[in-house]
C-alpha cells in the first residue's frame, strides 16, 4: 500500500468548539458518535467490521469504568466517496470529517499505530478527535502491544469527552513518593512490578537491578519499570489498559497525586474519576439498576459529490461600500480556483424575493466555471431581504440532484437584516439535512445571521467593508474546502491587501514547497484599475502585467501557473498606476502537488463562538502535515472587530498560558482586547523558515511498556513501534487561513483591571549542586500577556496541604525577584536552609500577582527531593541576589548555616520565623 500523507481532517477553517459535537447522551447512552474513515484509506470491509467489534467491547468497558452509568447506544460510520457504493450505505446528512469524533487514517514516516487524542484545552475541556490507524484496527498482534481495543477506546474517549490526561510520563519515568520510595510514574502505585536495567550481551538480553543515581536520588538512566502481568490493581485506564486487571479510573483514594503526570499538572492533582464524576454526562446519568445494556446500533453513511448553492444578497444596501463587486470578486476566485472538479454548484440571488440564476451545474471543465461566473449577480435592487424564502429557494436547487437535501450545502451571504424576521422556516431548516454556511458582510448584517449556521452545523464568517482586508475572499475559500478530499482542497499561501498611493508599490515574498507545487494561482485584486505587476519565480523567471489575465467585472488580474512551477521564494511588486490611492491585494492559492503527499495545513480553533464580556477567548492554530504536528513556526492571529480595529496576537507553542503542551504543533494565546460589541473575524498567518520548523510526534500516544514481569522474570515485548527518531525538518513555507468569526456582547468600559495573571502550568523543581532550582514560563499581568508585578512562592512537605491550603503553607519571600515578560523562561535558585539531608521531599507552588493585587490560580505543583545522605550545607557560595526568607513553624529541623567568613549560627525548630540574607 502506498504511504499516504493524510490531511489533518479538520482543515482550513475555524474549528467548531467541541460542545457543538453531534454526540448526545440520553439515559446514560451515547448517540450519534461519528467515526470517519479517511478517503486515502484503501477500501476494506474488514475495517468496518473491526470498528464495530471495538465499539461492542468498548461499551461494556465504558459501562464498568463509569460504575454502571454510561454506555454507547449508536454509532455513525462515515464511508469515503473513494469507496464503492453499497446497498447497506445510506446518505450522510450533516456528519462530516471535520467534526468526526474518531478518525481512521494512515500515518506516515513509520511512527507506529498508537492511538491518541488531539487536545487543545485544559482540564475538563473536550478534545478535538481520536485518531486510529487502519493497521491498529486490523493487526491482531497490536493487541499485545497496546492492549484490548475496547479499553483503549475508553481511555481515548475519556480524554476526548471529559478533558482528562494521561497518567504516565516517559520523560520523567520516576519520582520520590512521600514515604521516600522511588516509584514509577503511574496511577496507581498499587500496580506492582519490578525495576530493571537491560543489558545486551551478544545475542542475549540480560537484566540487572536498578541503582539509585546519587545526583538525582532516582533510578539510574536506562532503568525501566516492568509491571507484573498478573495484577490485582484495577486502576488506571489512563496509565496502561493493556493489563488484564486494569478496568477503572483512579479515584481520590487510589490516585498518585505526587506523580509527575500530565493529569496532575493540568488538573491540580485531582484524580481522573474526580474530574469525570463531576461532568454533565455523569451527573445526568445515575447508576443503572439493570447491569445489562443494549448492544450499539451502527449506521453506515457514504459521502457523495459536493453540492453547494451560492445564495447571494442583492438588496439595495449591496450597492454601497463596494460590496457588489467585492462579492463578485470573491465568487470569481471561489469558482475559478477553489471549487473542486466534480462539484455541483447552483446560484440564487435574493432580496425581498429569491431568483434562481443557475440550476446545479457540475464543474468538469474550465468552460463550466466560466458559465457559472457569467451568471453571477450583476446588479442590486432597492428592496430589503427575506431570508426564509431565499433559503427555501436554495433548498429547491439542491434537492434536484438526488431528491434529498442530505449532505448538501449553502453559502449564504447577506449584508443586512431579514425584512420579515420570519422564524417559521426554522424547524424545516433544522430537519433538512443541509448545512448552511453564513458570511455576514459588514457590521450592518443581521446579528442573528449566524443562527442558520448554528442550527445546521455550518461555518460562520464575518467580513468588514475595509478594503485593506481580504476576509471576504478568505471566507469563500474556507467554505469551498468543506467536505473535500485533501487532494481536492485549495491551500492559501498568501492573502494580503493594502491601500497604495499613486506611484507607490506593494511588495513581498511568498514561499512554496514541494507539497504545494501543483496548479498555482497568483491573483492580484484592485479597487479602480489594474496595477503594474512584476512577479519573479524561484528559478528567476519573471512574469509581468501582460502575463496576467484581467477581469474588469471582478476587479482582479490572474496568472495561472501549471504544475511544477518551482519551489522556493517568489517575490512580487505591485505598483499603483492609477491617479488616486487604491486598495491593491494579492491572493496566492495552490493545490497539492502529489495526491499521495499532504501539504502543510493550518486549522484554527476558537473556544467559543458566542462570548460575554469579560470572559476571555482562547485562539489556537494547529499546524501539521498530514497528522504530524509542525513545531517551530511563527504564527500570528489577526483579529478584526466590526469597526475595523485590529489586534495582532503571536500564538505560541510553549506549553504556557493558553497553550497546554510545548512543541505539539498547537499554537495558542488568550484574546481579551474587546473594543466593541459585535462580531470579530479571526485570520491566521503562518510562516516557517527553512530549518526552523520540524515535524514531531503527536502528544499523548498510548503508553508502551517495554515488557512485563511474569513468574518472577522480565518478558520483553517488541521494540516500541512509535520509535524515538527525530522527524525531518521542513523547508520554508507560508500559509493564510480565515478562522471564522465570533460574537462578543455586554462589553462594559469601566476602566477596571478585570484580568488577573494567568496560571503557571510548567513549574519545575530540581536539586543540583546543593541548590534548589525552580523554573517556569513567566505569566502576564493580564492572563498570558504583559508582565506580572510579583510572585508568591510557597512550599510544603504535604502536597495536598499545599494545594488545598496554599496560604497556610510556608512562605518563601521572593518579593525582590523581578518577573519577566509573559512567555519568557524564568529561573530561581536558592540554597535550602531546611534539613534535606535525609532525602525529604518538598513541594512548591507559585501564584503571580499583578499591579492591582489580583492573583493567578495556583500553579502546578513541583516536587523537589535531595539525594539521600547528601550534606547540602557544607558549602555556601558567593552570590549576586539578596533575598529575604520566611520559614513557617514546623518546617525547620536543627540546621547550621555556614558563611564564607567562617562565622555560623544555628536555626532550630523552636524558631517561629527566620529571616536572613542569602545569595549566590
Image: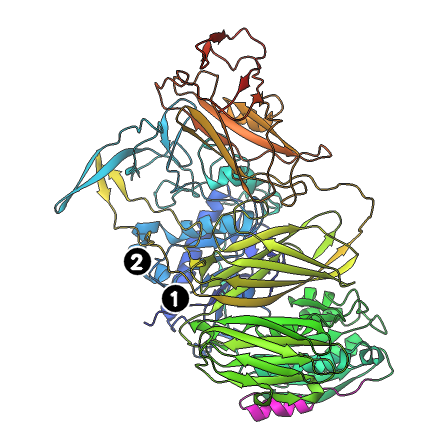
Residue under the image location 61 percent in, 73 percent down: 507
Quadrant of the rendered image containing residue 21: bottom right
Range of the magenta residues? 363-380
Between 364 and 727, the one lying in front of the other is 727
Q: Is residue 751 left or right of residue 332?
A: right
Residue furthest to the left: 202
Between 186 and 876, the one lying in front of the other is 876
Q: Is residue 422 magenta?
A: no
Q: In the rendered image of this protein, does residue 120 appear above or below residue 867?
A: below
Q: Quadrant of the N terminus?
A: bottom left
Q: Is residue 471 left or right of residue 873?
A: right
Q: Is residue 849 left or right of residue 245?
A: right
Q: Is residue 378 magenta?
A: yes
Residue 433 visible within the image: no
x, y (%) of residue 189?
A: 39, 32
Residue under the image location 44 percent in, 33 percent down: 259
**Disc 1/disc 2 C-alpha distance (Å):** 12 Å
x, y (%) of residue 504?
A: 69, 75
Element class at badge 1: helix
Q: Which mark is residue 47?
A: 1
Crowd tier of the residue under label 2, counting other residues whose Cα lies within 10 Å: few below 14, some 14–19, many 20 or above: few
Quadrant of the rendered image containing residue 352: bottom right
Between 64 and 858, the one lying in front of the other is 858
Who comes first in sequence, dot 1 or dot 2?
Answer: 1
How many marks do you count on the picture? 2
Residue 635 visible within the image: yes
x, y (%) of residue 874?
A: 39, 15
x, y (%) of residue 497?
A: 67, 72
On the image, numbered disc 2 is attached to which residue?
Answer: 140
Q: In the rendered image of this protein, does residue 312 appear above or below residue 715?
A: below
Q: Which mark is residue 125?
A: none
Element class at badge 2: helix
Amino acid at each position: 500500500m502506498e504511504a499516504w500523507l493524510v490531511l489533518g481532517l479538520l482543515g482550513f477553517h475555524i474549528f467548531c468548539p467541541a460542545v457543538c459535537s453531534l454526540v448526545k447522551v440520553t439515559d446514560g447512552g451515547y448517540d450519534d458518535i461519528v467515526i470517519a474513515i479517511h478517503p486515502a484509506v484503501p477500501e476494506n470491509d474488514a475495517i468496518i467490521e473491526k470498528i464495530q467489534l471495538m465499539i461492542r467491547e468498548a461499551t461494556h468497558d465504558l459501562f464498568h469504568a463509569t460504575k454502571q452509568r454510561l454506555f454507547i447506544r449508536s454509532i455513525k460510520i462515515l464511508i469515503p466517496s473513494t469507496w464503492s457504493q453499497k446497498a447497506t450505505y445510506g446518505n450522510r446528512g450533516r456528519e462530516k470529517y471535520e467534526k468526526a469524533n474518531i478518525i481512521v487514517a494512515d500515518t506516515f514516516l513509520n511512527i507506529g499505530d498508537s492511538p491518541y487524542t488531539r487536545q487543545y484545552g485544559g482540564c475538563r475541556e473536550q478534545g478535538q478527535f481520536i485518531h486510529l490507524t487502519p493497521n491498529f484496527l486490523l493487526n491482531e498482534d497490536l493487541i499485545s502491544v497496546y492492549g484490548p481495543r475496547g479499553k483503549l477506546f475508553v481511555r481515548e474517549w475519556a480524554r476526548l469527552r471529559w478533558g482528562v490526561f494521561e497518567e504516565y510520563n516517559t520523560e520523567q519515568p520516576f519520582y520520590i513518593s512521600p514515604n521516600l520510595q522511588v516509584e514509577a510514574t503511574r496511577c496507581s502505585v498499587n500496580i506492582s512490578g519490578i525495576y530493571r536495567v537491560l543489558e545486551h550481551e551478544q545475542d542475549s538480553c540480560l537484566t540487572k537491578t536498578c541503582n539509585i543515581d546519587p545526583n538525582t536520588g532516582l533510578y539510574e538512566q536506562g532503568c525501566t519499570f516492568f509491571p507484573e502481568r498478573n495484577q490485582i490493581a484495577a486502576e488506571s485506564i489512563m496509565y496502561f489498559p493493556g493489563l488484564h486487571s486494569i478496568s477503572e479510573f483512579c479515584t481520590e483514594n487510589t490516585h498518585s497525586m505526587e506523580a509527575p503526570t500530565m493529569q496532575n499538572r493540568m488538573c491540580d492533582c485531582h484524580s481522573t474519576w474526580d474530574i469525570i464524576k463531576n461532568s454533565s454526562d455523569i451527573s445526568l446519568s445515575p447508576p443503572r439498576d439493570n447491569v445489562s445494556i443494549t448492544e450499539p446500533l451502527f449506521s453506515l453513511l457514504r459521502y457523495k459529490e459536493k453540492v453547494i448553492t451560492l445564495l447571494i444578497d442583492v438588496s439595495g444596501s449591496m450597492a454601497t461600500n463596494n460590496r457588489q463587486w467585492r462579492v463578485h470578486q470573491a465568487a470569481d476566485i471561489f469558482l475559478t480556483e477553489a471549487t473542486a472538479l466534480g462539484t455541483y454548484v447552483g446560484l440564487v440571488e435574493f432580496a425581498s424575493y429569491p431568483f434562481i440564476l443557475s440550476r446545479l451545474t457540475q464543474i468538469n471543465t474550465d468552460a463550466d466555471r466560466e458559465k457559472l461566473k457569467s451568471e453571477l449577480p450583476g446588479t442590486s435592487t432597492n428592496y430589503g431581504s427575506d431570508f426564509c424564502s431565499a433559503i427555501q429557494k436554495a433548498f429547491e436547487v439542491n434537492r434536484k440532484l438526488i431528491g434529498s437535501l442530505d449532505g448538501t450545502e449553502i453559502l449564504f451571504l447577506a449584508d443586512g437584516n431579514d425584512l420579515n424576521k420570519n422564524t417559521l422556516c426554522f424547524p424545516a431548516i433544522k430537519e433538512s439535512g443541509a448545512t448552511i454556511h453564513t458570511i455576514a458582510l459588514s457590521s450592518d448584517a443581521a446579528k442573528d445571521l449566524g443562527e442558520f449556521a448554528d442550527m445546521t452545523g455550518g461555518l460562520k464568517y464575518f467580513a468588514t467593508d475595509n478594503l485593506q482586508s481580504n476576509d471576504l475572499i478568505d471566507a469563500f475559500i474556507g467554505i469551498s474546502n468543506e467536505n473535500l478530499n485533501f487532494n481536492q482542497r485549495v491551500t492559501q499561501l498568501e492573502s494580503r491587501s493594502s491601500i497604495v498611493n499613486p506611484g507607490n508599490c506593494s511588495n513581498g515574498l511568498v514561499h512554496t514547497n514541494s507539497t504545494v507545487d501543483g496548479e498555482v494561482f497568483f491573483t492580484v485584486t484592485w479597487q479602480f484599475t489594474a496595477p503594474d505587476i512584476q512577479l519573479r519565480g524561484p528559478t528567476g523567471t519573471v512574469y509581468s502585467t501582460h502575463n496576467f489575465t484581467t477581469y474588469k467585472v471582478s476587479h482582479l488580474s490572474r496568472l495561472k501557473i501549471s504544475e511544477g512551477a518551482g519551489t522556493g521564494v517568489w517575490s512580487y511588486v505591485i505598483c499603483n498606476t492609477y491617479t488616486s490611492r487604491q486598495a491593491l491585494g494579492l491572493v496566492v492559492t495552490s493545490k497539492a502537488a502529489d495526491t499521495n503527499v499532504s501539504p502543510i495545513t493550518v486549522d484554527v480553533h476558537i473556544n467559543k463562538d458566542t462570548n460575554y464580556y469579560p470572559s476571555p477567548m482562547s485562539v489556537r492554530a494547529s499546524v501539521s502535515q498530514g497528522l504530524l504536528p509542525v513545531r517551530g513556526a511563527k504564527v500570528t492571529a489577526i483579529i478584526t472587530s466590526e469597526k475595523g480595529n485590529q489586534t495582532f496576537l503571536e500564538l505560541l507553542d510553549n506549553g504556557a498560558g493558553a497553550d497546554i503542551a510545548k512543541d505539539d504543533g498547537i499554537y495558542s494565546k488568550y484574546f481579551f482586547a474587546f473594543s466593541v460589541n459585535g462580531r470579530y473575524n479571526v485570520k491566521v498567518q503562518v510562516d516557517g523558515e527553512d530549518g526552523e520548523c520540524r515535524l514531531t510526534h503527536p502528544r499523548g500516544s498510548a503508553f508502551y511498556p517495554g515488557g512485563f514481569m511474569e513468574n518472577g522474570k522480565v518478558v520483553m515485548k517488541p521494540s516500541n513501534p512509535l520509535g524515538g527518531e527525530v522527524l525531518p525538518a521542513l523547508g520554508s513555507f507560508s500559509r493564510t487561513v480565515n478562522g471564522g468569526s465570533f460574537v462578543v456582547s455586554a462589553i462594559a468600559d469601566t476602566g477596571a483591571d478585570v484580568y488577573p495573571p494567568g496560571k503557571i502550568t510548567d513549574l519545575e523543581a530540581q536539586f543540583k549542586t546543593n541548590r534548589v532550582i525552580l523554573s517556569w514560563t513567566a505569566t502576564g499581568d493580564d492572563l498570558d500577556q504583559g508582565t506580572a508585578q510579583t510572585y508568591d512562592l510557597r512550599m510544603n512537605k504535604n502536597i495536598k496541604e499545599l494545594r488545598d491550603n496554599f496560604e497556610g503553607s510556608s512562605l518563601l519571600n521572593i518579593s525582590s525577584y523581578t518577573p519577566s515578560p509573559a512567555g519568557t523562561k524564568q529561573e530561581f535558585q536558592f540554597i535550602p536552609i531546611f534539613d534535606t539531608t535525609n532525602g525529604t521531599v518538598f513541594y512548591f507552588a507559585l501564584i503571580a500577582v499583578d499591579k492591582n493585587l489580583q492573583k493567578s490560580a495556583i500553579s502546578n505543583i513541583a516536587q523537589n527531593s535531595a539525594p539521600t545522605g547528601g550534606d547540602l550545607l557544607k558549602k555556601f557560595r558567593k552570590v549576586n541576589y539578596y533575598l529575604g526568607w520566611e520559614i513557617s513553624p514546623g518546617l525547620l529541623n536543627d540546621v547550621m548555616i555556614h558563611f564564607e567568613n567562617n562565622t555560623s549560627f544555628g536555626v532550630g525548630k523552636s524558631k517561629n520565623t527566620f529571616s536572613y540574607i542569602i545569595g549566590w
